[in-house]
Amino acid sequence: MSEPAEIQPRSGTAFRLECGQVLRVIDIEGCQVSDLLAFSADDPREAISNGRTFDYEETIRLGEGCTLWSNRSNSMLTIIEDQVGVHDFLLTPCSKATFRHFYPDQPVHRGCFGNLAEALAPFGIEQDDIPCAFNVFMNVVVDGAGRLRVEPPVSKAGEYIRLRAEMNLIIGLTACSAYASNGGSFKPIHFLVED
Ligand SMILES: [Zn+2]
């Protein structure tokens, strides 16, 4: 197994993940979110879908044993190991607009959305094609009234999740840029593709 690659704080990357390969996403320092997108390498109009996933998995609490589904109702990724168990698939990638909305006193950052758009452009994926990401390690609490609250991730340094590709994929992956999502500080994310 090769050495993990590093995604610098507040940045992102994109790469191919072939059917059967396993992607390990590692929260190397702890308390850091990583937005994950998946598109079919054969036809990138097929993309990861939170709605399809909630429907078929019958839960919004996705963890070990769960499948992440596409907009065409095909399985894209299976979570085969999960050391954290708290992830979000409700909220969209942070962006310039979300920074203006939630952090009007802070400098605007292009966020995960801008980082994903730039990383995915060489694969022919445009920013309007970007769906809701699977937000690895993101801790979104839903209260009894249905209100949402973003809490710091519970992931500890070195903890990881492993996802197996069920088709040939293009993956987008970030180290998230939003203050609340990451407990107020920005850390790198490590990842590894296992054959
Ligand atoms: Zn983000």
Image (spheres, rainbow, N blue to C red):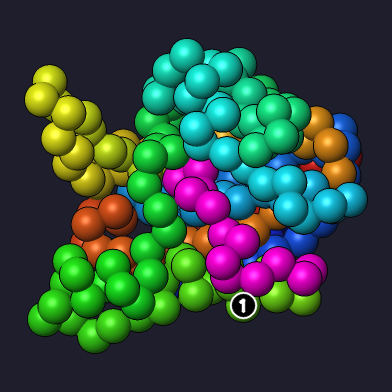
Residue bearing mark 1: 118
Q: Position of residue 19 (x, y in %)?
A: 87, 37
186 in magenta: no
Extent of the magenta region: 123-135
Residue located 22% across and 57% down the image = 180
Q: Give the residue furthest to the bottom.
A: 107
Q: Is residue 78 left or right of residue 18?
A: left
124 in magenta: yes
Q: State which quadrant residue 140 falls in.
A: top left
* Residue 1 at least partly seen: no
Q: Say above or below: 78 vs 130.
A: above
Quadrant for the C terminus in the image: top right
Residue located 53% across and 73% down the image = 115
Residue located 61% across and 61% down the image = 129
Q: Say above or below: 167 vs 188.
A: above
Q: State which quadrant residue 162 falls in.
A: top right
Identity of the amino acid at label 1? Glu
Q: Position of residue 59 (x, y in %)?
A: 43, 18
* Residue nearest the observer in this picture, 67 or 185: 67
